[in-house]
Image: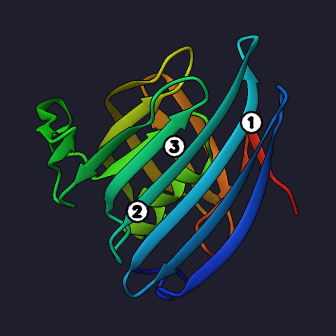
Amino acid sequence: MIDGYQDRRLHRRVMWRAVEWPGSEDLDLTADSTGVVADGLVIAVVDDQAVRMAYRIECDPDWRTRSVRIELHGEPPRQLTADGNGTWFEDGRERADLAGCIDVDIALTPFTNTLPIRRLGLAAGESADLGIVYLLPVPKLDISRAEQRYTRTDAGYRYASGTFHADLTVDSHGLVTEYPGLWTMVR
């Protein structure tokens, strides 16, 4: 890792609040030489629908996602596991549609942007194009592949997917502090 992300030991309790709609997230994040564990809870109103979503993401020490479990209130939990090299499984069956993806992006949390940010360790001006396991929890959980691009800027990262892009501000641990129009970290 470069640019300040060398330290593998990390324990943070973080909260974000939604900017343009009612919502917040509580995250407990631990990283050490054995791996990374993120436990998050999002409470929000999205498209006039109340959402309560709990998730747990486990990564290896190099921030490659190994499992993600997501629980939406009123639905059975779903879990994906990965080998860290781009092979994904759900309920013991390989998900060939997700082949080659290393990271996950849960649409309702700014935390999952941290996964490629930490894993890639881009220098200013560098970019990376990624296939991502994309989890869209509303109105019902959908799991698919998405193409995304991360570019390191002087102030943080430019995130792009399709026609959408956002300039993310991050802290010294790669956690998003400002996601314009969507999330802001509670200080």
Amino acid type at circle 2 is: Glu
The image position of residue 74, as x and y in percent, is 58, 23
Number of the label disc, if any, that sits on residue 182: none
Number of the label disc, if any, that sits on residue 43: 1
Name which of mark 3 and mark 1 comes first in the sequence: 1
Left or right side of 64 for 158: right
| Residue located beneath label 2 in the image | 58
Secondary structure of the residue carrying tag 1 is: strand
Residue nearest the observer in this picture, 48 or 159 = 48
Left or right side of 185 for 81: left
Camera sees residue 145: yes
Amino acid type at circle 1 is: Ile
Q: Separation of disc 3 and disc 1 at Cα?
A: 24 Å
Report crowding for label 3: few under 14, some 14 to 19, many 20 or more residues within 10 A (C-alpha).
Answer: some
The quarter of the image holding the C terminus is bottom right
The image position of residue 141, as x and y in percent, is 46, 23
Left or right side of 91 for 32: right
Name which of mark 3 and mark 2 comes first in the sequence: 2
Q: Quadrant of residue 83?
A: bottom left
Q: Separation of disc 3 and disc 2 at Cα?
A: 22 Å
The image position of residue 32, as x and y in percent, is 46, 85
